[in-house]
Amino acid sequence: MITQNVKKLNGEYTMMKPGIYTDISIEQYHDSEGISASGINLILDCPKRYWYEYMGHGAEISKQDKRQKEKFKLGQALHMLILEPDNFHKTFFAMEEEVNLTTKIGKEKYQEAEKEANGREVIRAGDWFDIQEMAKAAKAHPIWKHLEGGKVENSIYWDAGLFNTRLRARPDIYNDVLVVDVKTTDSIQVFQRSIYQYGYHRQAAMQLDGLKQFDNKKRAFGLFVIEKKAPYLTACFTLDEAALQQGHKEYMDGANLYSECLKANNWPGYEASEENLFQLLSLPKWAADKNDI
């Protein structure tokens, strides 16, 4: 493989040799080379969007986006409380009293909590209650009996077999027969839509393929889903072979596109050309069909 010479605006990505790493933090993983399932989602949508979010000014803007950071923090906290409960309080500090951050008193109490946290991430009381209840509901599901002793938050790096292209994945938990990824949702009844919308079939295929690169074991993939509101209902889904095959094809298409963009150092958007200034649009089929009534 040719070493990637990809740079973010604030420096180079960390280069990783192919393998499975057990001691890389989530921050180190996000700052390492290669393209993940979330990157595949973006580049398939628009290469310029990928470049902006991962390699351009958007990378720095995202780091400074408080709403995005808060959402990421709460997701990480839930995953850790479910999968690594012994490490939770080493990483997070949970407030016992709810505070209103629009008031002076609330801001002062939050600042006091930050001092007491001593570098740990602060979780507000209301969020802490929800996270505990979600984790409690999750752990009541029988799936975890099949994952005792499973490996948590390992980082996988492998070559896509294309110019300058490293793939990476970070399964939530896996053992020799099963990979499970924890997801939250507003409604389990409509979760099926989220699978395609967020590219979970591509993520599943990448995680299964990445692990198989190093031990040649065939595993099943499960999506463990928790609703974000009381009573915090849970369900566990698996994807059929057709979905996994489509996921494999799509992530390889994305990796190929990433490879081509790297090679040419060109990240196209939706721009027109001199030959084709306009893009032709039609009404969607459901709207056009109304004319036949």
Image (cartoon, grey):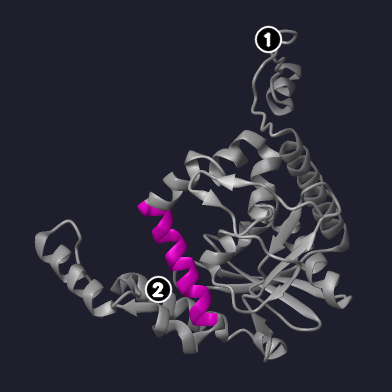
Which residue lies at the image location 75% right of the left edge and 8% below the top edge? 275
As helix, strand or loop, the secondary structure at mark 1 comes to: loop
Distance between the Cα atoms at labels 2 and 1?
A: 51 Å
The circle on residue 277 is 1
Question: Count the marks: how many?
Answer: 2
Q: Earlier in the sequence, mark 2 or mark 1?
A: 2
Q: Is residue 55 visible?
A: yes
Work out whether 92 lies above or below 193.
Answer: below
As helix, strand or loop, the secondary structure at mark 2 comes to: helix
Q: Which residue is mark 2?
A: 130
From the viewer's side, name the closer residue of 292 and 83.
Answer: 83
Mark 2 packing: few (<14 Cα in 10 Å), some, or many (20+)?
some
Front label number (2 vs 1): 1
Three-letter code, disc 1: Leu
Give the x, y percent position of residue 279.
Answer: 70, 15
Mark 1 packing: few (<14 Cα in 10 Å), some, or many (20+)?
few
Work out whether 108 lies above or below 149.
Answer: above
Which residue lies at the image location 66% right of the left edge and 33% below the top edge? 267
